[in-house]
Image (cartoon, grey):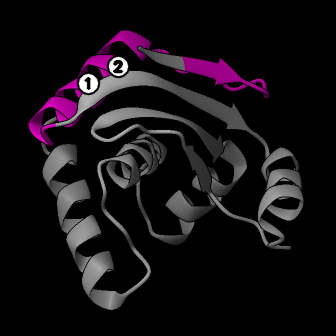
């Protein structure tokens, strides 16, 4: 089950459509949907999580905590709406497009994709673009 939670004034207006898109992505990646929680928050909220849990004193657009068991995906995906807005502006993207990229990026991590090396980052970006085309 995919759920959307809000720690800020921001609210999605297309939760059902996004949920179906994420579910279809999981199925196409040969994984099983467990409990996945998206938490939309502010820079300050996510920065505190980054410092407290990861000991990184930086701003970020997404932090995911993966509780998956094998191919059954479970986890909490925190997304800073502030950071997504700024990144959309910096990359000359629509906010909705950048938000969708971050949303699918989180679940692709649970499917096993990494982004620490250049090669892994290229594969992750390719997967993001593929699934963005299926929205």
Mark 2 element type: helix
Q: Which residue is mark 2?
A: 19
- Distance, label 1 to label 2, CA atoms, is 6 Å
**Quarter holding residue 129:** bottom left
The 10 Å Cα crowd at callout 1, few under 14, some 14 to 19, many 20 or more, is: some
In the rendered view, would you say 18 is above or below 74?
Answer: above
Count numbered badges in the picture.
Answer: 2
In the rendered view, would you say 111 is above or below 51?
Answer: above
**Quarter holding residue 34:** top left
Was residue 18 drawn as part of the magenta stretch in this picture? yes
Was residue 59 drawn as part of the magenta stretch in this picture? no
Can I make out residue 11 in this image? no
Residue 10 is labelled as: none
Q: Quadrant of the C terminus?
A: top left
The stretch of residues the image draws in magenta is: 4-30
The residue positioned 32% from the left and 50% from the top of the image is 108
């Amino acid at each position: 089950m995919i759920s959307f939670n809000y720690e800020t004034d921001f609210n999605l207006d297309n939760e059902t459509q996004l949920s179906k898109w994420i579910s279809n992505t999981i199925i196409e990646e040969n994984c099983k949907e467990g409990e996945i929680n998206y938490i939309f928050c502010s820079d300050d909220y996510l920065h505190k999580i980054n410092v407290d849990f990861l000991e990184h004193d930086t701003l970020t657009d997404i932090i995911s905590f993966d509780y998956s068991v094998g191919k059954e995906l479970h986890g909490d995906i925190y997304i800073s709406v502030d950071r997504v807005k700024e990144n959309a502006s910096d990359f000359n993207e629509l906010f909705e497009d950048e938000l969708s990229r971050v949303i699918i990026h989180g679940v692709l991590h649970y499917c096993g994709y990494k982004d620490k090396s250049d090669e892994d980052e290229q594969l992750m970006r390719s997967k993001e673009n593929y699934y963005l085309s299926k929205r």
